[in-house]
Image (cartoon, grey):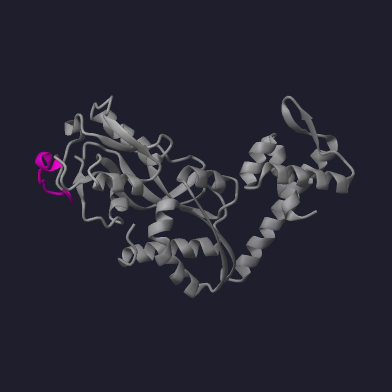
Amino acid sequence: MTETELLYVKTIAETGNMTKAAAALFVSQPSLSQALQRIEKKLGAQLFQRGSAGLTLTYPGRLYYESALEILKNYSAMVQEIEEFCGGTAGELRLGIASQFGRYALAHVLPKFRQQFQQVNIRLSEAASHVLIERLICGDCDLAILNCSQGDFRPQCDYDILVTSPFLIVASKNSRLRELAREEHGYRYPVVDPRFLGDEPLIMLNPGHRVRSAVDVILNQAELTSPNTLFYVDNLETAFTLAANELGITFSPTQFSACIANEKLAFYSIPARYSITWSTCITTVKGGYISPLSRAFSHLIKQMIRDGELVI
Protein backbone atom coordinates (compact mmCIF):
# COMPACT_ATOMS: atom_id res chain seq x y z
CA MET A 1 0.00 0.00 0.00
CA THR A 2 1.24 3.51 -0.85
CA GLU A 3 0.88 6.78 1.05
CA THR A 4 -1.62 7.95 -1.55
CA GLU A 5 -3.76 4.84 -1.11
CA LEU A 6 -3.72 5.28 2.65
CA LEU A 7 -4.76 8.91 2.32
CA TYR A 8 -7.55 8.00 -0.09
CA VAL A 9 -9.12 5.45 2.25
CA LYS A 10 -8.62 7.69 5.29
CA THR A 11 -10.34 10.65 3.60
CA ILE A 12 -13.24 8.60 2.25
CA ALA A 13 -13.79 7.11 5.72
CA GLU A 14 -13.73 10.51 7.42
CA THR A 15 -16.04 12.23 4.94
CA GLY A 16 -18.35 9.28 4.31
CA ASN A 17 -18.94 10.69 0.85
CA MET A 18 -17.04 10.12 -2.38
CA THR A 19 -17.72 13.60 -3.75
CA LYS A 20 -16.53 15.34 -0.57
CA ALA A 21 -13.49 13.07 -0.36
CA ALA A 22 -12.53 13.81 -3.97
CA ALA A 23 -12.84 17.55 -3.33
CA ALA A 24 -10.69 17.33 -0.20
CA LEU A 25 -8.05 15.32 -2.08
CA PHE A 26 -8.20 17.55 -5.20
CA VAL A 27 -8.87 14.62 -7.51
CA SER A 28 -11.86 13.87 -9.70
CA GLN A 29 -14.57 11.61 -8.28
CA PRO A 30 -14.19 9.01 -11.06
CA SER A 31 -10.44 8.80 -10.41
CA LEU A 32 -11.01 8.33 -6.70
CA SER A 33 -13.66 5.66 -7.29
CA GLN A 34 -11.33 3.76 -9.62
CA ALA A 35 -8.50 4.01 -7.09
CA LEU A 36 -10.72 2.58 -4.36
CA GLN A 37 -11.76 -0.29 -6.64
CA ARG A 38 -8.08 -1.10 -7.30
CA ILE A 39 -7.31 -1.08 -3.58
CA GLU A 40 -10.26 -3.36 -2.77
CA LYS A 41 -9.36 -5.70 -5.64
CA LYS A 42 -5.76 -5.90 -4.48
CA LEU A 43 -6.87 -6.69 -0.91
CA GLY A 44 -9.66 -9.02 -1.96
CA ALA A 45 -11.99 -7.29 0.48
CA GLN A 46 -14.69 -4.63 0.40
CA LEU A 47 -13.67 -1.66 2.56
CA PHE A 48 -16.89 0.34 2.47
CA GLN A 49 -20.56 -0.44 2.70
CA ARG A 50 -22.51 1.76 0.33
CA GLY A 51 -25.96 2.80 1.54
CA SER A 52 -28.42 5.67 1.80
CA ALA A 53 -26.44 7.10 4.73
CA GLY A 54 -23.27 7.27 2.63
CA LEU A 55 -20.12 5.20 2.83
CA THR A 56 -19.44 3.33 6.06
CA LEU A 57 -16.48 1.12 6.90
CA THR A 58 -16.82 -2.65 6.81
CA TYR A 59 -14.83 -4.71 9.30
CA PRO A 60 -11.87 -5.05 6.87
CA GLY A 61 -12.28 -1.35 6.15
CA ARG A 62 -12.03 -0.52 9.85
CA LEU A 63 -8.82 -2.56 10.10
CA TYR A 64 -7.39 -0.78 7.06
CA TYR A 65 -8.43 2.67 8.35
CA GLU A 66 -6.93 2.19 11.80
CA SER A 67 -3.69 0.87 10.30
CA ALA A 68 -3.63 3.79 7.85
CA LEU A 69 -3.86 6.29 10.70
CA GLU A 70 -0.90 4.69 12.46
CA ILE A 71 1.22 4.37 9.31
CA LEU A 72 0.57 7.96 8.22
CA LYS A 73 1.37 9.23 11.69
CA ASN A 74 4.68 7.34 11.71
CA TYR A 75 5.45 8.53 8.18
CA SER A 76 4.85 12.16 9.14
CA ALA A 77 7.07 11.78 12.21
CA MET A 78 9.81 10.26 10.05
CA VAL A 79 9.65 13.14 7.55
CA GLN A 80 9.71 15.64 10.39
CA GLU A 81 12.80 14.03 11.90
CA ILE A 82 14.63 13.93 8.56
CA GLU A 83 13.78 17.58 7.85
CA GLU A 84 15.09 18.64 11.22
CA PHE A 85 18.22 16.52 10.72
CA CYS A 86 18.85 18.30 7.42
CA GLY A 87 18.43 21.65 9.11
CA GLY A 88 15.58 22.61 6.83
CA THR A 89 17.84 22.95 3.80
CA ALA A 90 16.05 20.28 1.77
CA GLY A 91 12.60 18.84 1.44
CA GLU A 92 9.26 20.25 0.34
CA LEU A 93 7.39 23.39 1.36
CA ARG A 94 3.66 23.38 0.64
CA LEU A 95 2.47 26.98 0.49
CA GLY A 96 -1.10 28.17 0.35
CA ILE A 97 -1.25 31.62 -1.21
CA ALA A 98 -4.21 33.98 -1.41
CA SER A 99 -4.74 35.15 -4.98
CA GLN A 100 -3.92 38.82 -4.37
CA PHE A 101 -0.67 37.97 -2.55
CA GLY A 102 0.26 35.62 -5.36
CA ARG A 103 -0.24 38.31 -8.00
CA TYR A 104 1.60 41.17 -6.33
CA ALA A 105 4.07 39.88 -3.74
CA LEU A 106 5.08 36.29 -4.36
CA ALA A 107 7.44 37.13 -7.24
CA HIS A 108 9.49 39.27 -4.83
CA VAL A 109 9.67 36.66 -2.07
CA LEU A 110 10.39 33.41 -3.91
CA PRO A 111 13.71 34.43 -5.57
CA LYS A 112 15.18 35.34 -2.17
CA PHE A 113 13.90 32.14 -0.61
CA ARG A 114 15.34 30.08 -3.47
CA GLN A 115 18.74 31.69 -2.96
CA GLN A 116 18.83 30.30 0.59
CA PHE A 117 17.12 26.96 -0.08
CA GLN A 118 18.05 25.80 -3.55
CA GLN A 119 17.26 22.13 -2.84
CA VAL A 120 13.73 22.78 -1.61
CA ASN A 121 10.76 21.78 -3.73
CA ILE A 122 8.07 24.47 -3.39
CA ARG A 123 4.48 23.39 -4.05
CA LEU A 124 2.13 26.35 -4.42
CA SER A 125 -1.60 26.21 -3.88
CA GLU A 126 -3.29 29.46 -4.94
CA ALA A 127 -6.92 29.91 -3.92
CA ALA A 128 -9.37 32.07 -2.02
CA SER A 129 -8.62 32.44 1.69
CA HIS A 130 -11.55 30.30 2.89
CA VAL A 131 -10.39 27.45 0.62
CA LEU A 132 -6.83 27.73 1.95
CA ILE A 133 -8.10 27.40 5.52
CA GLU A 134 -9.72 24.07 4.65
CA ARG A 135 -6.53 22.88 2.95
CA LEU A 136 -4.52 23.82 6.04
CA ILE A 137 -6.86 21.96 8.36
CA CYS A 138 -6.83 18.91 6.06
CA GLY A 139 -3.02 18.89 6.10
CA ASP A 140 -2.59 19.78 2.42
CA CYS A 141 -0.59 22.97 3.19
CA ASP A 142 2.21 23.64 5.66
CA LEU A 143 1.26 27.29 6.01
CA ALA A 144 -0.85 29.81 4.16
CA ILE A 145 -0.59 33.52 3.42
CA LEU A 146 -4.17 34.71 3.40
CA ASN A 147 -6.45 37.68 3.99
CA CYS A 148 -8.95 38.16 6.79
CA SER A 149 -11.30 40.80 8.10
CA GLN A 150 -12.84 40.82 11.56
CA GLY A 151 -14.94 37.73 12.13
CA ASP A 152 -12.99 35.59 9.66
CA PHE A 153 -10.59 34.06 12.17
CA ARG A 154 -11.07 30.33 12.77
CA PRO A 155 -10.36 28.79 16.22
CA GLN A 156 -8.48 25.86 14.61
CA CYS A 157 -5.77 28.19 13.27
CA ASP A 158 -3.07 30.56 14.50
CA TYR A 159 -2.81 33.90 12.70
CA ASP A 160 0.42 35.90 12.60
CA ILE A 161 -0.72 39.27 11.22
CA LEU A 162 1.74 40.85 8.78
CA VAL A 163 -0.17 44.03 7.98
CA THR A 164 -3.60 45.50 8.69
CA SER A 165 -5.16 48.26 6.64
CA PRO A 166 -8.51 50.06 6.36
CA PHE A 167 -10.88 49.94 3.44
CA LEU A 168 -11.01 52.67 0.79
CA ILE A 169 -13.61 53.98 -1.61
CA VAL A 170 -12.34 53.77 -5.20
CA ALA A 171 -13.80 55.94 -7.98
CA SER A 172 -12.97 57.73 -11.19
CA LYS A 173 -11.10 61.00 -10.72
CA ASN A 174 -14.05 62.65 -12.45
CA SER A 175 -16.68 61.34 -10.01
CA ARG A 176 -18.66 63.73 -7.84
CA LEU A 177 -16.91 62.29 -4.77
CA ARG A 178 -14.33 65.04 -5.28
CA GLU A 179 -16.98 67.47 -4.05
CA LEU A 180 -17.82 65.38 -1.00
CA ALA A 181 -14.24 64.64 0.07
CA ARG A 182 -12.42 66.60 2.75
CA GLU A 183 -8.84 66.55 3.94
CA GLU A 184 -8.39 65.26 7.50
CA HIS A 185 -5.29 64.80 9.60
CA GLY A 186 -4.16 61.20 9.98
CA TYR A 187 -5.76 59.93 6.77
CA ARG A 188 -3.79 58.92 3.70
CA TYR A 189 -6.46 60.11 1.25
CA PRO A 190 -9.30 62.66 1.30
CA VAL A 191 -12.14 61.38 3.47
CA VAL A 192 -15.63 60.46 2.24
CA ASP A 193 -18.27 59.12 4.62
CA PRO A 194 -20.15 56.18 3.00
CA ARG A 195 -23.39 57.67 4.40
CA PHE A 196 -23.18 60.33 1.69
CA LEU A 197 -22.96 57.90 -1.21
CA GLY A 198 -26.74 57.89 -1.51
CA ASP A 199 -27.72 56.87 -5.02
CA GLU A 200 -24.15 56.58 -6.29
CA PRO A 201 -23.86 53.53 -8.59
CA LEU A 202 -21.86 50.78 -6.90
CA ILE A 203 -19.65 48.02 -8.29
CA MET A 204 -19.70 45.10 -5.87
CA LEU A 205 -17.97 41.75 -5.69
CA ASN A 206 -20.27 38.76 -5.84
CA PRO A 207 -21.50 37.28 -2.54
CA GLY A 208 -19.06 34.80 -1.02
CA HIS A 209 -15.97 36.99 -1.38
CA ARG A 210 -14.46 38.08 1.91
CA VAL A 211 -14.01 41.63 0.64
CA ARG A 212 -17.72 41.69 -0.23
CA SER A 213 -18.67 40.52 3.27
CA ALA A 214 -16.59 43.32 4.81
CA VAL A 215 -18.08 45.93 2.45
CA ASP A 216 -21.59 44.77 3.37
CA VAL A 217 -20.73 45.55 7.01
CA ILE A 218 -19.55 49.04 6.03
CA LEU A 219 -22.75 49.71 4.08
CA ASN A 220 -24.89 48.47 6.97
CA GLN A 221 -23.00 50.73 9.38
CA ALA A 222 -23.67 53.60 6.96
CA GLU A 223 -27.38 52.61 6.97
CA LEU A 224 -27.31 52.03 3.21
CA THR A 225 -29.61 49.03 3.31
CA SER A 226 -30.62 49.24 -0.39
CA PRO A 227 -27.49 50.39 -2.24
CA ASN A 228 -27.67 51.25 -5.93
CA THR A 229 -25.59 48.31 -7.18
CA LEU A 230 -25.14 48.35 -10.97
CA PHE A 231 -22.51 45.63 -11.41
CA TYR A 232 -21.53 42.42 -9.61
CA VAL A 233 -18.04 41.16 -10.49
CA ASP A 234 -15.72 38.33 -9.48
CA ASN A 235 -12.48 40.22 -8.81
CA LEU A 236 -11.23 43.63 -7.76
CA GLU A 237 -9.26 44.18 -10.97
CA THR A 238 -12.52 44.20 -12.93
CA ALA A 239 -14.13 46.49 -10.34
CA PHE A 240 -11.21 48.93 -10.64
CA THR A 241 -11.42 48.93 -14.43
CA LEU A 242 -15.15 49.68 -14.39
CA ALA A 243 -14.65 52.43 -11.81
CA ALA A 244 -11.83 53.98 -13.86
CA ASN A 245 -14.23 54.18 -16.81
CA GLU A 246 -16.80 56.09 -14.72
CA LEU A 247 -19.27 53.21 -14.46
CA GLY A 248 -19.57 53.34 -10.68
CA ILE A 249 -17.63 53.31 -7.43
CA THR A 250 -16.22 50.37 -5.51
CA PHE A 251 -14.43 49.50 -2.27
CA SER A 252 -11.04 47.94 -1.64
CA PRO A 253 -8.57 47.20 1.16
CA THR A 254 -5.75 49.74 1.06
CA GLN A 255 -3.05 47.18 0.23
CA PHE A 256 -4.85 46.01 -2.92
CA SER A 257 -5.32 49.56 -4.15
CA ALA A 258 -1.62 50.26 -3.75
CA CYS A 259 -0.89 47.53 -6.30
CA ILE A 260 -3.10 49.03 -9.02
CA ALA A 261 -1.47 51.56 -11.35
CA ASN A 262 -4.35 53.42 -12.99
CA GLU A 263 -4.11 57.16 -13.46
CA LYS A 264 -7.88 57.43 -13.91
CA LEU A 265 -8.63 56.28 -10.35
CA ALA A 266 -8.97 58.29 -7.16
CA PHE A 267 -8.94 56.82 -3.66
CA TYR A 268 -10.86 58.07 -0.64
CA SER A 269 -10.38 57.14 3.00
CA ILE A 270 -13.33 56.03 5.13
CA PRO A 271 -13.77 57.51 8.66
CA ALA A 272 -12.19 55.39 11.38
CA ARG A 273 -15.54 54.80 13.10
CA TYR A 274 -16.18 52.28 10.33
CA SER A 275 -14.10 49.72 12.15
CA ILE A 276 -13.73 47.07 9.45
CA THR A 277 -10.10 46.41 8.52
CA TRP A 278 -8.28 43.93 6.29
CA SER A 279 -5.33 41.85 7.45
CA THR A 280 -2.77 39.73 5.62
CA CYS A 281 -1.68 36.85 7.85
CA ILE A 282 0.70 33.93 7.98
CA THR A 283 -1.63 31.14 9.04
CA THR A 284 -0.88 27.71 10.49
CA VAL A 285 -2.91 25.00 12.22
CA LYS A 286 -3.17 25.65 15.95
CA GLY A 287 -0.90 23.25 17.81
CA GLY A 288 0.38 21.76 14.56
CA TYR A 289 3.97 21.04 13.60
CA ILE A 290 5.77 23.98 11.93
CA SER A 291 8.72 22.78 9.89
CA PRO A 292 12.06 24.62 9.69
CA LEU A 293 11.23 25.53 6.09
CA SER A 294 7.91 27.07 7.14
CA ARG A 295 9.61 29.06 9.87
CA ALA A 296 12.29 30.25 7.44
CA PHE A 297 9.71 31.36 4.87
CA SER A 298 7.73 33.24 7.52
CA HIS A 299 10.86 34.93 8.81
CA LEU A 300 11.87 36.01 5.30
CA ILE A 301 8.51 37.66 4.60
CA LYS A 302 8.59 39.56 7.90
CA GLN A 303 12.19 40.66 7.28
CA MET A 304 11.37 41.91 3.77
CA ILE A 305 8.41 43.92 5.13
CA ARG A 306 10.57 45.46 7.87
CA ASP A 307 13.27 46.36 5.35
CA GLY A 308 10.77 47.92 2.95
CA GLU A 309 11.52 45.34 0.26
CA LEU A 310 7.97 43.99 0.26
CA VAL A 311 4.77 46.04 0.29
CA ILE A 312 1.51 44.15 0.82
User: Magenta includes 33?
Assistant: no
User: Magenta includes 184?
Assistant: yes
Does 274 appear above or below 269? above
Quarter of the image where the C terminus is located: bottom left
Q: Report the magenta residues as a range.
A: 177-189
Query: What is the x, y in percent for residue 232?
Result: 36, 36
Query: What is the x, y in percent for residue 268?
Result: 19, 45
Q: Nearer the viewer, residue 79 or 277?
A: 277
Tell me the residue at 66%/37% (across/down).
19
Q: Nearer the viewer, residue 238 or 139?
A: 238
Query: What is the x, y in percent for residue 217?
Result: 31, 32
- State which quadrant residue 274 falls in: top left
- Residue 66 in view (yes/no): no
- The chief SS type of the magenta part is loop
- Residue 224 in view (yes/no): yes
Q: Nearer the viewer, residue 185 or 170?
A: 170
- State which quadrant residue 196 falls in: top left
Query: What is the x, y in percent for residue 124?
Result: 53, 58
Tell me the residue at 27%/38% (across/down).
275
Does 53 appear above or below 183? above
Tell me the residue at 19%/29% (across/down).
198
Considering every residue shown, the one lying at the far right of the view is 44
Does 90 appear above or below 194? below
